[in-house]
């Protein structure tokens, strides 16, 4: 093991020790003591009455009932300190630094690192908060992680059975057309569905190119994020807004915002691609210039893809009651949806020839990597989400209370969405806007007004939650999948911080600044 790796491990253990020392000194939560500090909505402040959402969604967009503070469980959000987020920060630093400093160690042991940080959070959390902590861990696994990984597995499996054959060569024009198609599809089949469907053909079309990294990054920007902003099917936070009373087609009101971001990014991409294309060869290799017709193989998998989209939509449209599993209350329709997704994936495996998947360079490693890493991310993220959902009653009250204008909502919602689950972030500021502008009014009355009189606030929240998911690998579900598939196909990808510094800061943030100047 290298010296740098040893130093990193020693530093990691020191951080864990510090976290343990701090945590055991935290006050125990007693069910007999009030958990609402002065200034909470129980003290009669209507402006904060809606800042602690009762629900937060799974990654595919359907809300899982959040029982924190309900069914006999204490609400930990108002009492958790900010340093309880240390394991989550260390999880992110591990994803960012280990592949750089100890790549061989990371490749073989990333699952153990994820488990280590999950245990580093869960151990002290259980010791201090006992049954309530156990409930929160079980809840995020059953209501969030399991549906999240089932959806990704189903989409990954089904899309892996669809193969585009023929001569498709990645010139700047062709690449822009593929990115534009993916951006348009993302709002109707979800960012995950569009990304998983097109990433392999996109990589194969450009396999003769030397500089491919920026291509995949812009693919993440456009197909895996920005493109999902027009309908509730596109991205989880918009689906959550739909379930809370925002009409299905209302999100088309942010079409100008989406066209501005997508248009600017596509123009930037085209000139970057043109520069590198001319620098490398300036033409398609002679032995590959001959045209062979494009055709899709395994097209029956589109039936299973439609089944996945239908199952997700169904779970948000019906209410068949709830079942209690290990203290976690989930809708029957959610369990049915998960079952249908598994069936769609299994049918795809059973009906698709092995040769198609082999020609598609299909392996299980990317989904395994995502499953291992995201279980650590989800568990270590628990304190962050609880504090965020506590709104003005939590340790981030200074941030929640500072959000006043649409510009604030756009940037604060977006920034948090880039590194946390964008769905509960959306819901937090959605409810903050309701409480600030329509205090004391029922949600059923306030949401229609927010869509009209205060529509600019909802536009800012919606655009921020979706667009900023492109800011990091963990900002949205398909980002990490696209990265993993690309690396497996031989395309080098930037590190966690490299992605942020070289691409987010240089390309995304200036584009978002333009959107701010024009619309907010």
Image (tube, rainbow, N blue to C red):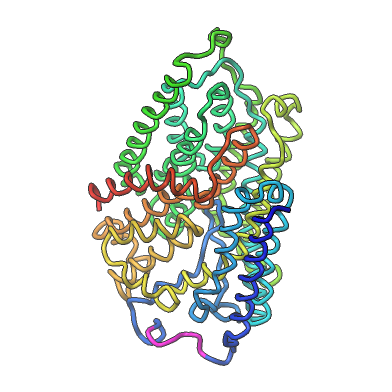
Residue 202, percent from left and from top: 54, 28
Vertical relation: 165 (above or below) 162: above
Instruction: Name the residue at 28% across, 61% down.
Output: 449
Q: Nearer the viewer, residue 458 or 208?
A: 208
Residue 170, percent from left and from top: 50, 22
Instruction: Name the residue at 30% across, 56% down.
Output: 451
Residue 322, percent from left and from top: 62, 65
Query: Would residue 63 appear left or right of 404 to someone viewing this image?
Result: right
Residue 507, percent from left and from top: 37, 42
Instruction: Name the residue at 71% across, 29% down.
Output: 357
In magenta stretch: residue 388? no
Magenta stretch, main secondary structure, is loop
Query: Would residue 67 appear left or right of 221 to someone viewing this image?
Result: right
Report the span colored magenta: 34-39
Q: How many numbered circles are shown?
A: 0
Instruction: Name the residue at 68% across, 80% down.
Output: 127
Which residue appears farthest toward the front when viewing the image? 3
Which residue appears farthest toward the bottom when viewing the image? 32
Tell me the quarter of the picture where residue 488 sits: top right
Vertical relation: 147 (above or below) 429: above
Vertical relation: 138 (above or below) 506: below
In magenta stretch: residue 36? yes
């Amino acid at each position: 093991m290298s010296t740098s790796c040893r130093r990193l491990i020693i530093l990691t253990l020191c951080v864990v020790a510090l976290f343990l020392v701090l945590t055991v000194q935290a006050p125990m939560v007693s069910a007999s003591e009030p958990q609402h500090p002065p200034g909470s909505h129980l003290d009669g402040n209507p402006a904060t009455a809606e800042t602690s959402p009762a629900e937060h969604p799974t990654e595919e967009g359907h809300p899982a009932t959040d029982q924190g503070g309900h069914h006999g469980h204490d609400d930990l959000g108002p009492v958790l300190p900010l340093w309880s987020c240390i394991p989550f920060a260390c999880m992110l630093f591990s994803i960012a630094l280990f592949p750089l400093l100890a790549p061989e160690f990371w490749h073989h042991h990333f699952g153990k690192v994820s488990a280590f940080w999950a245990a580093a959070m869960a151990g002290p959390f259980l010791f201090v908060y006992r049954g309530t902590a156990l409930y929160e861990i079980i809840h995020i696994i059953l209501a969030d992680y399991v549906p999240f990984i089932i959806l990704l597995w189903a989409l990954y499996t089904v899309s892996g059975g669809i193969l585009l054959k023929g001569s498709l060569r990645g010139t700047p024009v062709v690449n822009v057309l593929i990115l534009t198609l993916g951006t348009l599809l993302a709002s109707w089949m979800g960012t995950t569905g569009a990304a998983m469907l097109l990433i392999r053909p996109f990589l194969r079309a450009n396999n003769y190119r030397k500089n491919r990294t920026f291509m995949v990054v812009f693919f993440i920007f456009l197909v895996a994020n920005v493109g999902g902003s027009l309908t509730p099917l596109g991205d989880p936070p918009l689906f959550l807004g739909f379930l809370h009373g925002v009409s299905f087609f209302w999100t088309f009101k942010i079409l100008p915002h989406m066209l501005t971001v997508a248009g600017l990014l596509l123009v930037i991409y085209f000139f970057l691609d043109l520069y590198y294309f001319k620098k490398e060869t300036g033409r398609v290799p002679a032995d590959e210039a001959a045209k062979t017709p494009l055709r899709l193989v395994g097209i029956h998998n589109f039936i299973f893809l439609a089944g996945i989209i239908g199952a997700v939509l169904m779970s948000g449209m019906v209410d068949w009651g709830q079942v209690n599993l290990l203290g976690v209350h989930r809708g029957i329709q959610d369990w049915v949806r998960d079952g249908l997704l598994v069936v769609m994936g299994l049918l795809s495996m059973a009906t698709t020839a092995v040769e198609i998947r082999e020609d598609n360079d299909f392996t299980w490693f990317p989904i395994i990597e995502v499953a291992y890493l995201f279980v650590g991310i989800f568990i270590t993220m628990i304190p962050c989400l609880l504090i965020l959902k506590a709104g003005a009653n939590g340790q981030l009250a200074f941030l929640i209370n500072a959000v006043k204008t649409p510009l604030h909502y756009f940037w604060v919602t977006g920034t948090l969405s880039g590194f946390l689950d964008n769905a509960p972030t959306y819901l937090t500021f959605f409810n903050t806007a309701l409480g600030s502008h329509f205090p004391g009014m029922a949600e059923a009355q306030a949401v229609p007004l927010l869509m009209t009189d205060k529509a600019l606030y909802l536009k800012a929240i919606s655009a921020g939650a979706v667009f900023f998911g492109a800011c990091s690998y963990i900002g949205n579900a398909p980002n990490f999948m696209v990265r993993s598939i690309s690396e497996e196909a031989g395309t080098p990808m930037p590190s966690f911080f490299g992605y942020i510094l070289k691409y987010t800061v240089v390309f995304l943030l200036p584009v978002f600044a333009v959107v701010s100047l024009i619309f907010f």
